[in-house]
Amino acid sequence: MAYIQFLGAAGTVTGSKHLINTSSDAEGKNGFQVLVDCGMFQGQKEWRERNWQDTPVPAREIDAVVLTHAHLDHCGWIPRLVKEGFRGPIYATSATIDLCGIILPDSGHLQEEDAEFYNKYKKSKHDPALPLYTLEEAQECMQYFRAVQFGESKHLSGEISFRFVRAAHILGSSMAEVTLDAGGRSRRLLFTGDIGRVRDQNIAPGKVVHSGPTEGETADVLVMESTYGNRRHPTDDPRPQLAALIRQTVERGGSVVVPAFAVERTQKFLFMLKELMESGQIPRLPVFCDSPMAIKAVEIFLKHTEEYSGETRSLISQYGSPLNWPGFTFASTPADSKKINDSRFPCIIISSSGMVTGGRIQHHLAQRLPDPKNTVLFIGFQAPGTRGFTIKSGAPEVRIYGEIVPIRAQVAAFEQFSDHADPPELLQWLRTFTRKPEITYLVHGEPAASTQLREFMTKELGWKVQVAQWMEKVEVQ
């Protein structure tokens, strides 16, 4: 009997890996094996350590990967999969492939840098400290990517095919509709990846790409994310509060440091800052985007005009490319980054990684967290166990590069910037299904979030819903 096995993002919000095996053999040795997403575990140590474990299913035995989008918790383990022996095709949308072409090498580069730092200063328990994979290994894995257009049906074997539909989460993001023909029956499996937010620009402002996932879906089995399963996004417009926060920080002579995901979140925030400056709601202070990957991501966004929201089209039409905006500096090199730290005047610094798990943001926070004049502003989800979670939770100090850094700066967070649908938005989308699935498995959420969403769906929709468990196999009947 064909089955799905949850190899990641089950019991946690990272490391998405869902294996489909078409075998009628109970041990799954004779089936075609497809991995939907191949993400890196982030956050708590117990999860991060799983990045170093071999796949429960040998990589060389996996026939294909179907990738929903280009966030590290969905794509970041692909170079390691290839390193372990995978040689099949990796299917994704064109925009996702372009983004992976910068995200994965950047991930490898950061891991090499971290390993070098820990070896130099003897900060690791491992001797020597090693990267999970290198920049070169990440670049090499790109040869296996194959572009598939939205709506195009792609046959993987005689019994399994899929097509991508829009998830509206980030540029190029998709859901994977998988059709499984076995035993004289046809079954549709829908893997949501991450689900984008509603279409209302007032409560989800700054959306760079299409808002709202594709409606009118049909699925026998639904595998759905639950990141925000126990939280609701604020419904007020964040722009007035954001403007006030920036003005207050500038008035006391401080700077605003924003840890932001290089893909989508940085672009969204840049457009919003431009809008606030042009409308006179905040002063025209210097803005530094310190992320080589974010710079390349801007270039990719400008290439994929088919993904733009109406708001983005209007802004680009009016102001041109963000890379050419006066007062906005994009730091490409380490030397450019160091110059930002020399600045003693109020400014806005946007840098990755968004959860402060690595990258240049660590240097800026190490320098500016101890100063109460400054503000650290979070505009994205912070997974438990990350430095971002520690800072956001009100801790008095945080460890960065092995050193204890006191947290005296003001810490603020805006939840409106999230690109994950919350329970009311998810239910709004699920009600458009042409019929209810026979069963839904919730993944990609902390246990409390998945459990709460299960209760919402059971009560409000009357659906059969289970929370997926790590390594669990479920039959597709």
Image (spheres, rainbow, N blue to C red):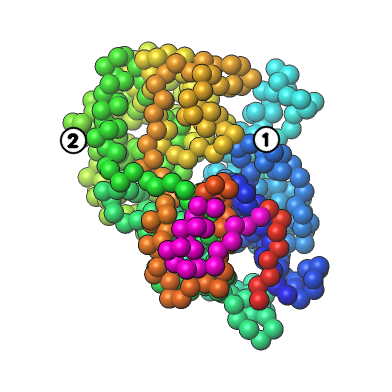
Percent coordinates x, y for residue 175 in the rendering: 50, 62
| Left or right side of 23 for 389 | left
Mark 1 residue crowding within 10 angstroms, few (<14) / some (14–19) / many (20+):
few
Q: Which residues are magenta?
A: 450-469
Q: In the rendered structure, does residue 456 fall within the stretch colored magenta?
A: yes
The residue that disc 2 covers is 279
Q: Sequence-wise, which precedes: disc 1 or disc 2?
A: 1
Image disc number at residue 409: none
* Local SS, label 2: loop
| Left or right side of 334 for 461 | left
Give whichever of 438, 408 is nearer the camera. Answer: 438
Predominant secondary structure, magenta span: helix
User: Label 2 amino acid?
Assistant: Ser
Q: In the rendered structure, does residue 32 fall within the stretch colored magenta?
A: no
User: Label 1 amino acid?
Assistant: Lys
Q: Quadrant of the N terminus?
A: bottom right
Q: Residue at x 40, y 14 (%)?
A: 372
Q: Residue at x 59, y 61 (%)?
A: 466
Quarter holding residue 471: bottom right
Q: Of discs 1 and 2, which sits in the foreground? A: 1
The residue that disc 1 covers is 45
Q: CA distance from mark 1 to mark 2?
A: 45 Å
Percent coordinates x, y for residue 322 in the rendering: 33, 39
Give whichever of 450, 129 is nearer the camera. Answer: 450
